[in-house]
Amino acid sequence: MRCFVSGKKPSIPFFLASILLVALFLRIGMLFYWERRVEPPFFFGDSETYWDLGRQIAQGKPYAYGASGEFRIFRMPGYPCLLAPLFLFGGDNPPVLFGRLLSVAFGVSTVWAAWLLASRLFSGDSTLSRQARDILPLLAASYVAVDPLQVVSSVLILSEAPFGFFMLMQIYCWSRMFQASRSAVPTVRNVSFLLAAMLGLSSAACVYLRPAWFYFPPFVIVLQCLGYIVPNPVAFFVRPLVDLSGRFVSGGRVPESSASGRGIRFQHTGRLCRTSNQTDAQHARGDMMALYLTRYLIAVSVFSICLFPWCLRNHRVSGHVVATTLQTGASLYDGLNPEADGSSDMRFVARFRDSEPLDSPTYEYDVDTKMKRAALAWAAENPGAVLRLALHKFHRLWNCRPNEPAFSSPAVQAVVFLSYVPVLLFGLLGSVMIFRRGMEWGMEYRLLLAPAIYITMLHVVFVASIRYRTPAMLLLATPAAYAFLRLVDFCSKKTT
């Protein structure tokens, strides 16, 4: 790895500031391009609803949308609350440019958050040199700074930019909580309680911005439990397929044991055998789960306290317990209906709304329930179509080129391909390396892949687009940088 270790140690603040400036200039440039070329001001329908709800909050009016204010649980209030100060200082009709500048600020902050997360995770990694450990977070931040999808999402009147920032902070607090909980220093271990509270706050912020993130924390907890049952899933399920990559990861040889002595190892026969310390490892994992349980109780308590006012307000408005919004039915039917093709087409909503009496006190709840039932009934009657749709949505989500014909020019396709495919491939390779280490590296490294899995599971049911994969790519940039640095190290050893 001579190209990285020769010379003086790089000035990390200087390089980080340079990356942040590049991110700012790219987003400002995209902002002015969008302002001049794209008409009308709100390219997406969701943008107008966010803008109107932000005005309602600033003016102290009821939080409702529609001609007669019939939709009162239509959107989570997180992003409208961020837009509300623009109306307080800019009047009833502030320039949309102000909202785009707010998104730019969050977009640049997301670059910094990507650097922070990567620097904390790999600060003590023994598989990389000291200089490489400094370079890795800079590479991850550089990708987030210049990725075209990240740049475009940072100028839209949508919740993507603030959500990306708070999601990275959620993963950061989660990973730091894991690390602090395992520390042998009591003072550091006590910090994990504060990190658990911060985890609850950041998780609530994510849900207030994107309600579909409500089930992400329990999803990660399930993954964590599975991680203790199967510490090394790569070795357990697909070890024969990664033997070649194992030689690369371990410097040319495949270790006989895996999972770091956690109770499972492979001998030359490839059969699973029990080790002498399997019982001790199981007890250690049980103690660690009990340790995490106390932190999770704090995180869940803070998360619940943050969401309680919204849930209480929804119960008073609708007479039902609604944790997020009453748009689940529309989103579900958008993805599961006879005309569904994986893209969004909400023209059916008017038909369902017209079928319910507008003056009913539970109008919004009844419409949502009706669409849910219709979507689930169609899915139960057409399992084959649901499976074909799921495969098509998977392709749309992880497509290497834009799905929309409006963005099908050769230049746009080339930019998306070159900025996506290499990072995806290196990210998957880095994820394999992380999973091959079993629980030796801890659950915090597996958090890097959890959003990609969660988003995939979510959008093979709902509608899919490359727009929805941007949060996953924020985190895949880190294992991609790790795999790239390991590849450079591997090649440098081959040349010596």
Image: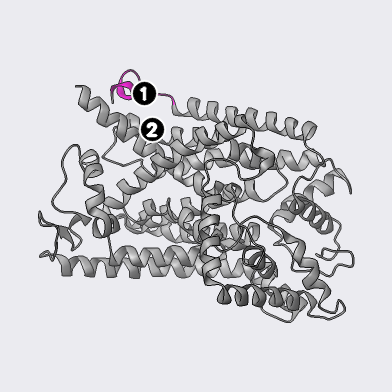
Q: Is residue 5 shown in magenta? A: yes
**Viewer-closest of 141 and 293:** 141
Q: Amino acid at mark 2?
A: Asp
Q: Amino acid at mark 1?
A: Lys
Q: Left or right: 117 with respect to 236?
A: right
Confirm whether residue 209 shows in the render.
yes
In the image, residue 322 lies at what x, y percent?
A: 66, 74
In the image, residue 447 lies at what x, y percent?
A: 42, 54
Contact check, label 2 and label 1, Cβ < 8 Å: yes
For the stretch drawn in magenta, what is the main secondary structure?
loop
Q: Residue lying furthest top in this view?
A: 7
Which residue is found at the position 54% from the left and 51% from the top?
Answer: 397
In the image, residue 430 lies at what x, y percent?
A: 35, 43
All told, the count of numbered labels is: 2
In the rendered structure, which segment of residues is drawn in magenta? 2-11
Name the secondary structure under disc 2: helix
Which residue is found at the position 35% from the left and 40% from the top?
Answer: 123
- Residue topped by disc 2: 134
Give the label on residue 118, or none.
none
Image quadrant holding the C terminus, namely: top left
Determine which quarter of the picture holds residue 201. Answer: bottom right
Packing grade of label 2 (10 A; few <14, some 14-19, many >=20) is many
Give the label on residue 9, or none.
1
